Every structure is written in structure tokens, then in C-alpha cells.
Image (tube, rainbow, N blue to C red):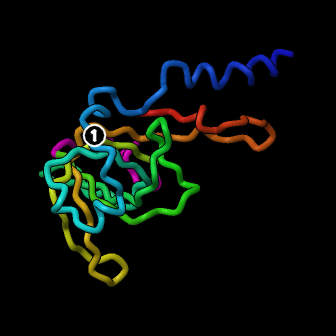
């Protein structure tokens, strides 16, 4: 009985009040008509526009100018969580003059962000010149999954995300 109650309350404790991972102010600025496919095709056409994006961090570069994340893009769901079940449509670079916490923003981390399109950058990806849309981060969240125990039925695992 006690175990069943804990399992029933677990999602509520972690999800209460977390309808969206990105703030209302940032979501209001974002132009939701800009798809990642359009952005990847011609990043300069959207310079100065704000977009909501997410995905998995592929690489991190930290230096005196701040932090740059190479992100494998995944479509965001209704709460701005990356949907890694749907195939990625490409990659983008997310930059900030801040030093992002390496414990949370590391390769493999899921991220949701809102930022301004600042252009494009061409750099090698597996030996091929790849054009990355570049986004100046306004707001970013790293989303960590807790350790999942297969013996428990957690149901909708999106309720178990933790945001930094």
C-alpha cells in the first residue's frame, strides 16, 4: 500500500507547476512559424528572430568568450521538451557569453532553449562542411532524466524530468 501511494504521488511531486520548461516571457517572444527545416535551409533569412529549439548536446566548447553548444535538434513537444523519438532534422549551435555549468550542460544532455537567430557558421561535421544555424541563447534549460528502474512502471516518463 505504501509503495503504491509513493509511486502514485511521484509524478505529481516532480511535475506540479511545471507546465512549460521555458518562461512565458521567452515563449511570447518566439516566432513559432519558423520551423527548424526553414531555419536550417537559410539561417540568415531569420536573423534577429527568436526561436524555441531543443535537442541533445553533441559537443560543448568553453572559452573566454563563453560557451557554445552543438545541439542535435529534436522537435519540441507541447511543454518544450525535446521529443527524441522523432528523427532529428539537423544540428545547430547555441552560444552564450556565460559559462554554462559543465555538470548539467554536457554531451548527451537534453536541452530546451529560446534564443535569437544570429546567422550561420560553416564547420566540419564528419569530414563534410556543414552549415549550422547559430542561436544566441536567451533562456536555456538542461533536462535530466532520473535513474529509471525497470521493475517500476512509471507510465508517462515525461513527468520524471528534472530541469536545471
| Furthest residue in direction bottom, as rendered | 127
Within the image, what quadrant is residue 61 found in?
Answer: bottom left
Residue 9 pos. (x, y %): 69, 19
Say whether residue 42 is left or right of residue 54. Answer: left
Of the 4 image quadrants, the one containing the N terminus is top right
| Residue under label 1 | 30
User: Horizontal placement of 129 versus 64: left or right?
Assistant: right
Q: Is residue 40 above or below residue 113?
A: below
Q: Nearer the viewer, residue 133 or 31?
A: 31
Across and down, in percent, residue 162 comes to 50, 33
Quadrant where the C terminus is found in the figure: top left
- Magenta: main secondary structure equals loop
Vertical side of 25 occupied by 141: above or below? below
The front one of 70 and 87 is 87
Q: In the rendered view, would you say 104 is above or below 44?
A: above
Q: Assign a secondary structure to mark 1.
A: loop
Q: Is residue 98 magenta?
A: yes
Q: Residue at x 67, y 23 (%)?
A: 10
How many numbered tags mark residues here?
A: 1
Image quarter for residue 40?
bottom left
| Image coordinates for residue 18, horizontal then vertical, percent | 48, 25
Task: Tell me which residue sits at (39%, 51%) in the image.
Answer: 106
Using residue 126 as the reference point, say whether residue 122 is left or right of it: left
Q: Is residue 132 above or below residue 80?
A: below
Query: How packed is label 1: few (under 14 Cα within 10 Å), some, or many (20 or more)?
Result: some
> In this orientation, which residue lies closer to the viewer: 56 or 101?
56
Q: In the rendered view, does 77 fall on the left or right side of 47?
A: right
Indicate the position of residue 48 as horizontal and vertical percent values. Answer: 14, 49
Residue visible at 54% across and 54% down in the picture: 84
Of 8 and 101, which appears nearest the observer?
A: 8
Q: Which residues are magenta?
A: 97-109
Amino acid at each position: 500500500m505504501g509503495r503504491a501511494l509513493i509511486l502514485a504521488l511521484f509524478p505529481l511531486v516532480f511535475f506540479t507547476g511545471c507546465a512549460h520548461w521555458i518562461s512565458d516571457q521567452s515563449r511570447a517572444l518566439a516566432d513559432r512559424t519558423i520551423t527548424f527545416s526553414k531555419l536550417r535551409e537559410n539561417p540568415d533569412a531569420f536573423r534577429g528572430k527568436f526561436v524555441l529549439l531543443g535537442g541533445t548536446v553533441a559537443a560543448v566548447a568553453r572559452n573566454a568568450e563563453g560557451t557554445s553548444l552543438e545541439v542535435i535538434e529534436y522537435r519540441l513537444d507541447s511543454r518544450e521538451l525535446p521529443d527524441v523519438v522523432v528523427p532529428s532534422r539537423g544540428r545547430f549551435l547555441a552560444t552564450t557569453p556565460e559559462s554554462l555549468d559543465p555538470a548539467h550542460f554536457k554531451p548527451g544532455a537534453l536541452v530546451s532553449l529560446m534564443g535569437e537567430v544570429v546567422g550561420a557558421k560553416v564547420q566540419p561535421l564528419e569530414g563534410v562542411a556543414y552549415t549550422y544555424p547559430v542561436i544566441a541563447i536567451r533562456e536555456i534549460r538542461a533536462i535530466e532524466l532520473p535513474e529509471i528502474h525497470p521493475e517500476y512502471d512509471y507510465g508517462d516518463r515525461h513527468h520524471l524530468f528534472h530541469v536545471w
